[in-house]
Image: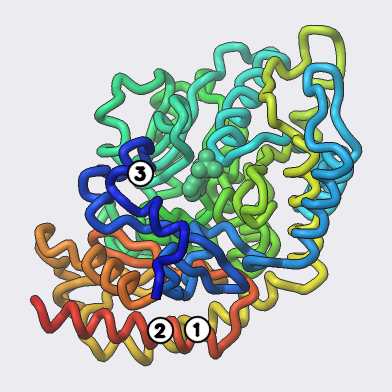
């Protein structure tokens, strides 16, 4: 059989001209992975091999691939208006999308600052927070608090807010004014406490940090309600309400980075709903357009937004060529309406519960599952050498990477790290799809365990 035409791009010669994310290219060219087309929850590589997408690309394609409504909206918009002059005005779809976002986000998050990526949304949130304090008589408030093991983006300030050392050290010194605290990692509590006896010490201890640091210098606290990079770190119910109280007490803006958790992923439209806490700024991206176009937003509360609606000089001094782009906005409108009207958050809740049951039943007996955690269709599995003592695998085993790579070779895309792996499939998945995914994962784990 002749090779498909796009297979010619999966060669070292063709790949000489591209630099990919977080990847040593000399390794990548040995086994290039190029996706050629997709449909529903499946995609095919340039050689025609089929894969189940257990990760929605990267927690992004919430409505699935080839969704007719989103395709129609994007193609119609391309024909009508592909771009507008951003320094002079905007376009109807961007205004319509901002209105829809104001409707679907919780509380008084009624103003959308549209941008093109999650990093840009968080970056904008930091600037909005600093300017807000400046415009309300607290110009000294500029520091941004965040947590170890978090990820908020790849740009300079969001990288500095991130809490994974190896992603920063090559580029340090990082931006000044970024402080970190420990995450609510209950399975391996950094404070060596046990929930619920701890009474969420990890949240309460922030008071000490704020007081010692000087509350007059702190602008905002940014958290992912559930943190992906640390291994789907899922807080106990009291954690985010405690952060909310502390932020209110010390006039610190609470920013939720919902770039992954937004648009149904955790079983409600936003994790803010899942945990019943409304932030002052909610940053979202990925699932908003389901990946059909680059699109993200910082949703701003009335309290913050009204300080930008006034005298010249109080406007947001910020811009991007593609922010509020009409094609991206059209994709967002169609994707968000699909998510809402087809009740995809409810499906995420039901399918997530089913997935957890299947993982418990299938993987626990294999003797390497430490913890299964998450909400909705954001589910992580921490892998350990001994579940009874939580002893991790030796670092050189790279258990999660090995299993993840084997699963990919067996036709299943997952998120994988040295010590954990995660599922984040499109929110349209069915029980039958999940059964297939879990079966491939089980096979892959058994294959890897035989090699150890
Ligand atoms: C929680 C979180 N915040 C921010 C970002 C950055 O988004 P982007 O890659 O669209 O810049 C990501 C990306 O994966 C993310 O997971």
Q: Residue at x 66, y 78 (%)?
A: 347
Q: Find the distance from the CA under tag 1 to the CA under tag 3.
A: 35 Å
First of labels 3, 2 by sequence position: 3
Front disc: 3 or 2: 3
Please tell me in which quadrant of the rendered image residue 127 appears: top right
Q: Is residue 271 left or right of residue 91?
A: left
Q: Assess disc 2: are there few (<14), some (14-19) or many (≥20) residues with their C-alpha within 10 Å of its C-alpha.
A: many
Q: Secondary structure at mark 3?
A: helix
Q: Is residue 183 above or below residue 341?
A: above
The numbered dot on residue 16 is none
Q: Is residue 297 left or right of residue 326?
A: left
- Residue wearing tag 1: 434
- Residue wearing tag 3: 14
- Residue wearing tag 2: 438
Along the line of sight, the residue nearer the viewer: 179 or 410: 410
Give how far across and how far down residue 312 sits, in percent.
Answer: 83, 8
Res. 157 in view:
yes
Q: Are marks 1 and 2 in contact (CB under 8 Å)?
A: yes
């Amino acid at each position: 059989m002749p090779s498909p035409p796009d297979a010619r791009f999966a060669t070292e010669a063709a790949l000489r001209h591209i630099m990919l994310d977080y990847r040593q290219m000399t390794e990548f060219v040995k086994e290039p992975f190029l996706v050629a087309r997709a449909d529903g929850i499946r995609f095919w590589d340039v050689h025609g091999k089929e894969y189940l997408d257990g990760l929605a690309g990267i927690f992004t394609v919430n409505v699935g691939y080839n969704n007719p409504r989103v395709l129609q909206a994007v193609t119609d918009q391309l024909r009508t208006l592909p771009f507008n002059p951003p320094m002079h005005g905007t376009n109807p779809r961007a205004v319509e999308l901002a209105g829809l976002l104001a409707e679907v986000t919780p509380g008084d998050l009624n103003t959308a600052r549209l941008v093109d990526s999650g990093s840009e949304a968080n970056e904008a949130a930091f600037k909005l927070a600093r300017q807000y304090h400046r415009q309300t008589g607290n110009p000294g408030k500029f520091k941004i608090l965040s947590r170890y093991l978090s990820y908020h983006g790849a740009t300079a300030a969001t990288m500095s807010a991130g809490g994974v050392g190896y992603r920063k050290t090559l580029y340090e010194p990082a931006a000044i004014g970024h402080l970190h605290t420990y995450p609510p990692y209950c399975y391996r509590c950094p404070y060596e406490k046990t929930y619920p006896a701890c009474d969420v010490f990890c949240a309460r201890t922030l008071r000490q940090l704020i007081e010692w640091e000087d509350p007059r210098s702190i602008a905002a606290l940014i958290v992912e309600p559930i943190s992906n990079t640390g291994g789907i770190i899922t807080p106990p119910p009291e954690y985010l309400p405690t952060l909310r109280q502390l932020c209110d007490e010390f006039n610190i803006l609470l920013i939720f980075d919902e770039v992954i958790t937004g648009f149904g992923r955790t079983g409600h439209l936003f994790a803010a709903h899942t945990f019943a806490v409304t932030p002052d700024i909610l940053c979202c991206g990925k699932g908003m357009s389901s990946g059909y176009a680059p699109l993200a937003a910082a949703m701003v509360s009335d309290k913050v937004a009204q300080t930008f609606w006034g005298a010249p000089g109080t406007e947001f001094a910020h811009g991007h060529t593609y922010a509020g782009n009409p094609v991206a906005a059209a994709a967002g409108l169609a994707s968000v309406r699909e998510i809402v009207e087809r009740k995809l958050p409810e499906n995420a809740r039901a399918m997530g519960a089913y997935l957890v049951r299947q993982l418990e039943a299938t993987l626990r007996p294999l003797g390497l599952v430490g913890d299964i955690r998450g909400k909705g269709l954001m589910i992580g599995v921490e892998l350990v050498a001994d579940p009874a003592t939580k002893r991790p695998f030796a670092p050189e085993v790279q258990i999660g990477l090995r299993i993840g790579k084997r699963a990919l070779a067996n036709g299943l895309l997952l998120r994988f790290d040295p010590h954990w792996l995660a599922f984040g499939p499109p929110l349209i998945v069915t029980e039958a799809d999940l059964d297939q995914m879990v079966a491939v994962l089980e096979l892959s784990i058994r294959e890897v365990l035989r090699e150890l």
